[in-house]
Amino acid sequence: MRSVVIDAPGSVRVDTCPDPGLPGADGAVVAVTAAAICGSDMHIYEGDFPVVEPVAVGHEAIGTVVEVGPEVTSVKAGDRVMVSSVAGCGRCAGCATRDPIRCHSGPLIFGSGALGGAQSELLAVPGADFQLAPIPDGLCDEEALLLTDNLATGWAAALRADIPVGGTVAVIGLGAVGLCAAQSALFLGAATVLGIDPVPQRRERAAAMGATPAPPSATVAAMEHTGGRGVDAVIDAVGSDTTLADALTAVRAGGTVSVVGVHDLQPFPFPALAALVRSITLRMTTAPVQQTWPQLVPLLQSGRLSVAGIFTTEMPLDAAPDAYRAVAARSGDVVKVLLTP
């Protein structure tokens, strides 16, 4: 099979690898029909996370089940499925919450090593009854693909931001996760969502979805729009030192900072005293993917929540090196890339 591999920072190739087998009696093999490039993949591509050996990347995929183990009951060969980007064992008390992050064995992410990458023709999926779900009726491929990670992440970020109805929220970073978070915040009752991003075209894209384009500094935007009080909540979809510090300054006293952006391996100098005396709530998470599906699927099916415009580009798997370069340019034209085998 073909699989996208990162050898070193800035070095992407499409490799030919052996086809995967069943990862166990509870596992499945999925033929990937569409995958996507995530901001987390870019951390590997850009060297934020060191690569000591070639890494098969990608953790967002939908496809068709090719084979299942004898213990799998929820899907069968031929089913079109979405694959949770975060994998748990599916059997422990943590996984019983439908949040793979709480797995007692430790959650794993496709495309970060042990599980292999989803930007491939085939994907071995352990714990298939937990990781896989049939693609619901009425959802297009782009919606199903966003449910595997970005929409689930943006939705979780907004839920964890304690957004008061009628409140003001700043979203830092208007890539796919930030756009999903902005949409989610508006759906959950925010009156104003300030879209923070240094790229003007991305701010314009967020504005077309209902956000208010704002200066690239969350602190400046927050103070301008609240008369110096600060916003009720900040969603940081970048996770750098700069954006984390900006978020903690932009939020009002008693407000909440919800972080879903992935920080690099260097420690962040957390301003503990300032956060303490201002009674700031800080929440950080990756996507509790399976936990979000019962909420998000009906909202997408009904049209109450829209993700139109988040995917901007479609390219074949063999063009992955060009796709990664396009995403790394962080232009307003390329926000989210869909890869097809």
Image (spheres, grey):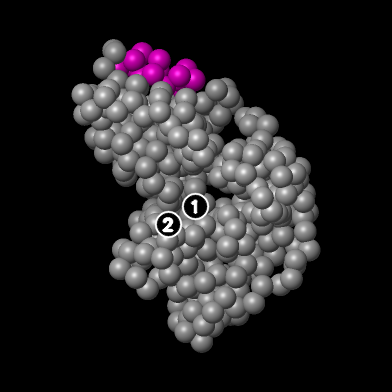
- Residue lying farthest to the bottom in this orientation: 70
- Which quadrant is home to the N terminus? bottom right
What span is in magenta?
Answer: 213-226
Residue 43 horizontal/vertical position (percent): 59, 41
Circle nearer the N terminus (1, 2): 1
Determine the residue positioned at 55% across, 70% down. 125
Residue 280 horizontal/vertical position (percent): 25, 30
Q: Magenta segment: does it hold 215?
A: yes
Callout count: 2
Query: Which one is nearer the viewer's eye here, 337 or 38?
Result: 38
- Which quadrant is home to the C terminus? bottom right
Q: Which residue is mark 1?
A: 149
Check if mark 1's residue and mark 2's residue have beta carbons within 8 Å: yes
Determine the residue positioned at 37% across, 42% down. 284
Side of 166 relative to 150 (left or right): left
Residue 21 horizontal/vertical position (percent): 64, 77
